[in-house]
């Protein structure tokens, strides 16, 4: 019970622990942090990950389509008749409108509406991802743009290829792992294990009608098969990064998933994008990582958890070998008081926050503080992920200042390999979702106290 009052009394005291890393002068927030990455749902992923490039774009598209929901949009793609009318005449027009949202001069930031009649925005011939109002701007921008042009070329392809996830034409390979789970420590080994199955899947997608339709609709030449395969693989890592990162956390923190009654993972700060249309089965890959597990319950908790997302049923027993996905709409510390403290639900075995972004602004820090202190004081194994090395450094500093006992941090072996462009500033180095992780367990002060007690006991 103590943690709550302790939480309230908490005042940031000067840390007695030497900072692990220096805070960089400016903490970067390369991707809008409030709109966190889309969840594991294959269908919603493609659609909502657009938000990373253009915040609000998914809503914008729905609005332009005069549709109330993603379901309705999907219905149209499947050839059905929308209830509220269809704003675009064809797929081509929709892709065009999407591309229009990227049309501004990367150097002088001019929008098409701000240009004189004689000028048009033309894209960089190499990456087809940034626009210029004229050769002067392009020349002036090149020293900055040359560093990211190649990576942005991949971004431009991935952005289009994501539609195959939206439409369900790219279905990820699934099924129990054929290798010993200890062998699969990262993407290299994961890809080697899935290699045969994956080759068939990728070939089927490359030869699909959906692929032909896509490239016929986007007003640019269809890239080589190798380029398209590379893109599909990056998209795959983007979808599976979340479940496998949870698995990585369970492994790294040495959590026993062979517990009778099952194990529970909370994804805290889960957003609408992460849960909207997330279906049971989307986290199966996590289950395959732990053959013989006795049930895994993943609960998404956040104020923006999609309304329709399956609400957590308190005392439901987990079937051995199954992964259950559910959600709770609300703040984490409220959820804790209502569900955990009352004993309706068990303490989580692991808590994960994908890109909490508390380093980015005082407002976000204020929102996260009660949760961070609760997790620290209840000694819950916790993992957070961040987009970049700068964010890693800034977040570590904050956690050190909060006296959390950091157990590990570093590069995530299951980070998304899909580069994310900073939409409003395309020449910024692209980032990768869950590129780095930090794990903490309890308080560094408590540890000191325990060590002290041990010493005292030794003397007695
Ligand atoms: Zn310009
Ligand atoms: Zn370029």
Image (cartoon, rainbow, N blue to C red):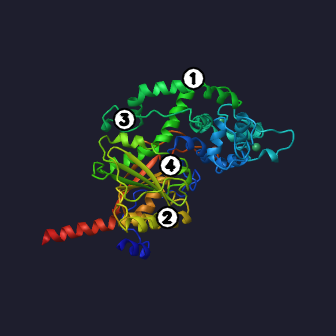
Q: Position of residue 429 (x, y in %)?
A: 57, 44
Q: Position of residue 430 (x, y in %)?
A: 57, 43
Q: Which residue is mark 4?
A: 388
Q: Residue at x 27, y 52 (%)?
A: 260
**Label 2 element class:** loop
The residue lying furthest to the right in this view is 117
Residue indicated by mark 3: 176
Cα distance in 3D space between marks 4 and 3: 32 Å
In this rendering, position of residue 314 left or right of residue 361 = left
Q: Which residue is mark 2?
A: 331
User: Which label's residue is closer to the chain start, 4 or 1?
Assistant: 1
At 41% from the left and 30% from the top, the residue drawn is 194
Residue 381 percent coordinates (x, y): 35, 57
Q: Nearer the viewer, residue 231 or 263?
A: 263
Residue 96 percent across, percent down from the top left: 73, 37
Kindly indicate whether the residue at mark 1 contacts the one at mark 4 (C-beta within 8 angstroms): no
Mark 3 vs 1, N-terminal side: 3
In the displayed structure, would residue 29 be above or below residue 123? below
Q: Relative to the observer, which residue lies in front, 130 or 262?
A: 262
Question: Which residue does the numbered mark 1 point to in the structure image?
Answer: 207
> Label 1 vs label 2: CA separation?
46 Å
Label 4 vs label 1, nearer the camera: 1
């Amino acid at each position: 019970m103590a943690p709550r009052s302790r939480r309230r009394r908490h005042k940031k005291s000067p840390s007695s622990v030497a900072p692990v890393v220096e805070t960089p002068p400016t903490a970067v927030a390369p991707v809008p942090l409030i709109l966190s990455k889309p969840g594991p749902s294959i269908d919603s992923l493609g659609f909502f990950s657009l938000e990373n490039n253009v915040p609000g774009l998914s809503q914008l598209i729905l609005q332009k389509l005069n549709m109330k929901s993603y379901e309705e949009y999907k219905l149209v793609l499947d050839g059905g008749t929308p209830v509220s009318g269809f704003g675009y005449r064809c797929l081509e027009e929709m892709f065009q409108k999407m591309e229009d949202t990227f049309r501004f001069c990367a150097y002088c930031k001019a929008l098409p509406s701000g240009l004189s009649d004689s000028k048009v925005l033309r894209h960089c011939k190499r990456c087809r991802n940034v626009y210029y109002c004229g050769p002067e701007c392009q020349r002036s921008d090149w020293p900055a743009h040359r560093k990211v042009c190649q990576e942005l070329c991949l971004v431009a392809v991935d952005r289009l290829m994501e539609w195959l996830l939206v439409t369900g034409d790219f279905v990820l390979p699934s099924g129990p792992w054929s290798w010993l789970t200890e062998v699969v420590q990262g993407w290299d080994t994961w890809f080697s294990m899935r290699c045969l199955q994956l080759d068939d899947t990728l070939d089927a997608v490359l030869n699909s009608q959906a692929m032909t339709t896509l490239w016929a609709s986007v007003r640019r030449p269809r890239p080589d098969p190798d380029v398209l395969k590379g893109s599909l693989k990056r998209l795959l890592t983007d979808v599976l990064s979340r479940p496998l990162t949870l698995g990585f956390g369970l492994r790294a923190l040495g959590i026993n998933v062979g517990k009778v009654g099952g194990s529970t993972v909370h994804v805290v700060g889960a957003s609408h994008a992460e849960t909207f249309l997330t279906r049971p089965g989307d986290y199966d890959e996590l289950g395959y990582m732990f053959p013989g597990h006795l049930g895994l319950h993943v609960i998404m908790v956040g104020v923006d958890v999609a309304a329709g997302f399956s609400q957590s049923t308190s005392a439901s027993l987990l079937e051995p070998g199954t992964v259950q996905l559910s959600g709770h709409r609300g703040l984490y510390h409220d959820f804790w008081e209502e569900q955990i403290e009352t004993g309706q639900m068990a303490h989580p075995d692991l808590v994960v926050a994908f890109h909490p972004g508390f380093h980015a602004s005082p407002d976000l820090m204020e929102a996260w503080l009660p949760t961070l202190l609760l997790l620290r004081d209840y000694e819950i194994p916790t993992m957070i992920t961040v987009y970049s090395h700068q964010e890693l450094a800034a977040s570590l500093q904050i956690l050190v200042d909060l006296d959390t006992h950091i157990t590990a941090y570093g590069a995530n072996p299951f980070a998304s390999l899909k580069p994310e462009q900073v939409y409003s500033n395309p020449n910024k180095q692209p980032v990768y979702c869950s590129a780095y992780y930090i794990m903490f367990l309890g308080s560094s002060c408590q540890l000191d106290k325990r060590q002290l007690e041990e010493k005292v006991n030794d003397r007695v």
